[in-house]
Amino acid sequence: MSYAPILTIANEKGGVGKTATAVNVAAALARAGLRVVAVDGDSQADLTWGVGAEPDQGPGFAEAIEHAAQGDTFDPATLLPTVVDGLRVLAGGQGLAEVAPELYTAGADGEEWVSTALRAVAELEDVDVVVIDTPPSPGPVTIGAIMAADLTLAIANARQANSVAALQTLIERAKAISARGGHGGVRVVLQGHDEHRVLHRDMRDRLQAEPEGLFAVIPHSKDVEESPLDGVPLVASRGRGSSRTAWALCDLAQDAYNVARQIHTQQVTAA
């Protein structure tokens, strides 16, 4: 069982705000005094750029997966510093696209390699929590990240009605993984909500009525989308970090960490 709780951010559809959520949850927890590792599971490496690091600075997540497949130990030197004190990143990048065919061919073993690599990060003594950003696909990286997680945050976006269908697929997948004993729990987060728009309120009410309910509602703000382009998370931005959206993301980070830690403790006790 991993030493630190693991939070996975997921939806099998792109553009719903997964990376923005992961970047700001990781940064908020680091600013709260925790030692955080953000893991970039996407070949586009948007999370890596969003925390002020560069994916080509050295080995990243792809190499960590390859080492796990070979039974090698994880090298902490792989983790890169970021613009936020207390936050390091395991970089994404093109290497993930290159390793993808091998993971798909390996099937369940490939998913387990991903999960093993992530748990190896969580087992480092100087890590309090791991936050994972997943790619927009139901492939081995996403499944392995859900397998490793104590808690998965399933992201819907109020401006994308079809994100709800993808969300339901993700929830069912997470439940199936949980039934195999490899997953802690799932909570639903609605990104990009505008209380003044009827369709947004309808989506919020629809999600609230689902069995999983709504864990958090994040108000729409252009800042949350644009801040990763600056290489500074919204919650760590001096100019924009006091917005209503930034505060909502900070609350989400703390609530998600508390739930993940509780689930993690229960799993450790049960083991």
Image (spheres, grey):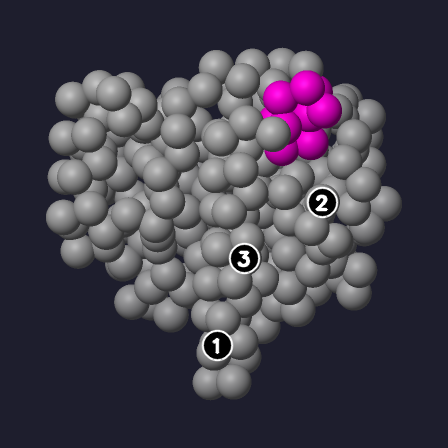
Residue at (72% x, 55% y) in the render: 34
Q: Which mark is residue 267?
A: 1
Q: Amino acid at mark 3?
A: Tyr
* Residue for badge 3: 257
Segment colored magenta? 231-241
Q: Is residue 181 left or right of residue 94?
A: left
Q: Amino acid at mark 2?
A: Arg
Instruction: Name the image quarter holding residue 92.
Output: top right
Q: Position of residue 242 (x, y in %)?
A: 60, 29
* Residue for badge 2: 31
Instruction: Name the image quarter holding residue 184.
Output: bottom left
Q: Where 123 falls versus 13 (above or below)?
A: below
Residue 133 within the magenta-colored segment of the rendering: no
Tag 1, which secondary structure? helix
Q: Nearer the viewer, mark 2 or mark 3?
A: 2
Q: Is residue 35 left or right of residue 165?
A: right
